[in-house]
Image: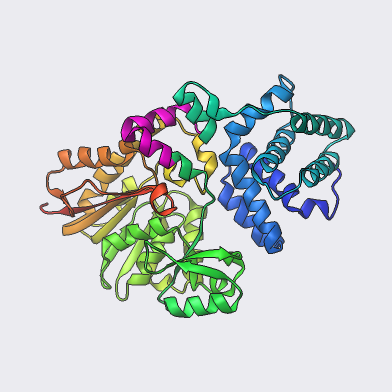
Amino acid sequence: MKTNACLDQTARYLAVDILTRIQRENSYSNILLNQTLMKYRLPVQDANLLTKIVYGTLQQQLTLEYWLNPFIKQKKVLPWVKELLLSALFQLQYLDRIPARAVLDESIKIAKAKGHDGIRKFVTGVLHAVLRSQLPDPHEIADPFERARIVYSVPGWLVNQLVTENGWEKTNLLLSSINQPPHQAIRVNTSKISLQQAERALTAAGFTWRRSQLSPTSLIIQSGFAGNSQLFKNGSIVFQDESAACVVASMEIKADQKVLDACAAPGGKTLQIADQLQTGHVWALDIHEHKVKLIEKNAVRCGLQARVTAQKLDARLAVTKFTTGFFDQILLDAPCSGIGLLRRKPEIRYRKNLQDIHALSQLQLKLLENLVPLVKLHGKITYSTCTIMQTENQQVIKSFLKQHPQFSLQNPRRIGREIFPDEYETDGFFMANLIKNAN
């Protein structure tokens, strides 16, 4: 495989590589994108283009395939070639400020560099045919469910479920919002630096930012990649979405408490808990050794290692390692479908189905039940997910309370709090605080 030393570090070339790896390795777009940005340190304009192409191609995948399929018909296309065509089509249809000639020229160069002359000719032919054609308008599809599937690029089962749970008006708002680019949200590690100090340091380093509407210690970076900043390297800031930060805020952590983060990786909430402790301690569990090491590494970076113990342990077995009533508070940020993260991880929508949702709800309930003995009398279990599916949220809490009448909702007026992506332009999250009133 031949590559040009300059070409293989351009935004378009790197985008094709990332998109191909996402499909081949089942990787997550946000992780690969952050790794690439940190490795290559692209100029701001190129970094922004790379981000737009990766997220946009994934977010509009079904729409793009709807347009592309008639041009490739039944031809067997190599995965990277398909990603090259989809990403080029995304730029042609959605990035108005980029000249079509620039998209064509570089796409053809990438085809030649990564493949052979036959692939170059194929890519050239397809893209020229696309430009000559009048692409169909998916808004004209008659069936409302099929129209939503193609327009918003989400699988049919998800359209059906969202309409069932929320009605068409809310579903359209939700689906319109999930294809917007995700914000670059950071949380300030207030054990190291104040919010105001972080703001001044970011401004001095050339970043533009705004304060969060949801989280008092969160900022939205509007230009520049914060992962390359000195503040990130020295642990003064961490990447964490505003809605995720609301989960720990709802726990109302006291400085001397013993807290369990039962499903902790990648550790953002563990660090947020530790930030609020002084004489207290947080135990962070995960079933994967490499994720435990990541939590430990981030705790050291943030200077919080003395308040954090990370260990490899299935949360369902925590009752065998800790004594009854050991914890003042437990956070169960449960494994879930991740449907609330479609802005940040758009590929999730193509990997899940309704059977997954129901299977996950059973696991979530089991995890909750296994943690019951570990929280002390009048202590609190906080249940959270990064999904907006009621099967994984309100229905799990209803089932738990029915089986465990010794618990009650901290706020009895509603079954938890939902943050929808369309409300604050954030990830979608659910959280419910459960108080233990009797043993």
Residue 193 visible at all: no
> Is 6 situated above or below 231?
above
Where residue 418 appears, x then y in whole percent?
31, 48
Residue at the image position 77 percent from the left and 54 percent from the top: 9
Quadrant of residue 404 in the image? Answer: top left
Q: Is residue 233 left or right of residue 364?
A: right
Q: Quadrant of the N terminus?
A: top right
The stretch of residues the image draws in magenta is 154-174
Magenta segment: does it hold 155?
Answer: yes
Residue 222 visible at all: yes
Q: Identify the image's colour scheme: rainbow, by chain, secondary structure or one colour.
A: rainbow
Front residue of 259 and 288: 259
Q: Give the residue furthest to the right.
A: 117
Q: Give the residue furthest to the top.
A: 74
Where residue 314 appears, x then y in whole percent?
38, 47
Residue at the image position 70 percent from the left and 28 percent from the top: 134
Where residue 77 appears, x then y in whole percent?
74, 27
Quadrant of residue 140 in the image? Answer: top right
Front residue of 239 and 284: 239
Majority secondary structure in the magenta region: helix
Residue at the image position 44 percent from the left and 54 percent from the top: 265
Where residue 130 appears, x then y in whole percent?
74, 31
Quadrant of residue 94 in the image? Answer: top right
Say how many tags the image has. 0
Front residue of 1 and 65: 65
Q: Is residue 95 left or right of residue 236?
A: right
Magenta segment: does it hold 296?
Answer: no
Residue at the image position 16 percent from the left and 49 percent from the top: 413
Q: Is residue 241 left or right of residue 407?
A: right
